[in-house]
Amino acid sequence: MANINDAFPSNYLKASDLQGQRPVVTIDRVEFEPVGQKRELKPVLYFVGKEKGMVLNKTNAKNISNLVGSFETDEWHGFRVMLYSANVEFQGETVESIRVKAAPPVNGGVSTVVAPPPDPAPAKTLSADDIPF
């Protein structure tokens, strides 16, 4: 059976690319690229070892800025985050979107970031190599 998301490939990461998983990824860089029909310059977040970048919206950009402690995107390199999908309101419609939160501490270390509220449904945490984007 065909997946409708396969019929509309994208150069950028989509919520469906996460396949319901919550990968932990490492930020590589942010580049400004022409995106969409109007070819507006938007920030695109790239991850270490991944091809597709994630077009940043205001919500995710602010979340990452708060997690990293800097609005300077050059300072985001090497920071680990967890990606997950969530239903959000966009132009009067409910759509699936990618959201970003703090990655779990490495090797049982102590996190200096206040954890967000628990998610409504438990999901398996994967390494960056487990998600094919």
Image (cartoon, helix red, strand yellow):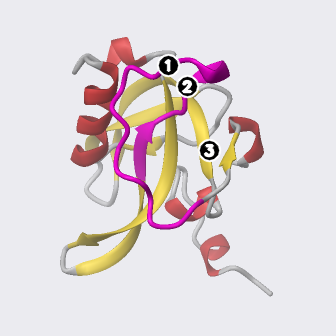
Mark 2–mark 3 CB contact (< 8 Å) = no
Q: Is residue 21 left or right of residue 67?
A: right
Q: Which residue is mark 3?
A: 23
Circle 1: residue type: Val
- Magenta residues, as a range? 99-122
| Of pointers 2 and 3, the one earlier in the residue sequence | 3
Horizontal and vertical percent position of residue 35: 35, 49
Q: Which residue is mark 1?
A: 110
Mark 1 to mark 3 CA distance (whole Å): 20 Å
Q: Relative to 77, say whether 41 is above or below.
A: below
Q: Secondary structure at mark 1?
A: loop
Horizontal and vertical percent position of residue 57: 28, 47
Mark 2–mark 1 CB contact (< 8 Å) = yes
Circle 3: residue type: Pro
Q: Nearer the viewer, residue 49 or 18?
A: 18
Horizontal and vertical percent position of residue 74: 35, 13
Camera-side mark, 2 or 3: 2
Q: Which residue is mark 2?
A: 105
Q: Quadrant of residue 86?
A: bottom left
Horizontal and vertical percent position of residue 93: 26, 81
- Magenta span dominant secondary structure: loop
